[in-house]
Image (cartoon, rainbow, N blue to C red):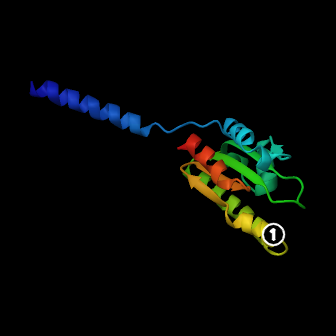
Amino acid sequence: MKRIITATMAALILVMAFAGCGAKNADLKSVLSDINSKYADATAGLKELTEVEDLDKYYAISVDDVKQFAAEINPDTSTAPVEIVLVEAVDKTASDNVKNALDARYQSIYSLYSSYSADQVELVKKCKVTQSGNYVTMVVASDYDGIMETVNAAIK
């Protein structure tokens, strides 16, 4: 009887352990599409970055660090700063590299707008770069809180 109980408990523990380890595999292009449908006012007119090499061009993110990504930027720099960058890195080291690159871009945006637009710098201050496991995001948009709710629901 003790062996049956012990075996049952061990099996239950294994099932619970595997269930707890299952991380979501978010499709970042779908997440960005969801953001665009929910926050059309904030994302209207954005240019989609379609090639992983664009991340290197705009953010100095190595293509070797990227498992998947979705990104849109505002091509009109005379208006509000709007950039949405969602990256799943290949591992923890790559995730840290991506975060450092996006932190540098965020600081660049902050510096740019703090030098001439008080209204825009306030928008930038409310936004940030986040890292959750291998997922790294940079969202600079007027609907930051809502956009991040959508992102977090998909990746956590």
Q: Nearer the viewer, residue 107 or 96?
A: 107
Say above or below: 12 vs 152: above
Say above or below: 78 vs 112: above
The residue at the point 63 percent across, 54 percent down is 145
State the image coordinates of residue 5 (x, y, percent, origin top left).
Answer: 15, 28
State the image coordinates of residue 36 (x, y, percent, origin top left).
Answer: 74, 41
Is residue 93 found left or right of 122 in the rendered image?
left
Residue 89 appears anywhere in the view: no
The residue at the point 66 percent across, 48 percent down is 147
Which residue is disc 1 drawn over?
Answer: 113
- Outermost residue toward the bottom in this view: 115
The residue at the point 9 percent across, 24 percent down is 1
How many numbered circles are shown? Answer: 1
The residue at the point 80 percent across, 55 percent down is 58
State the image coordinates of residue 68 (x, y, percent, origin top left).
Answer: 67, 40
Q: Nearer the viewer, residue 59 or 47?
A: 47
Q: Nearer the viewer, residue 100 or 26?
A: 26
What kind of residue is marked 1? Tyr
State the image coordinates of residue 19 (x, y, percent, origin top left).
Answer: 40, 34
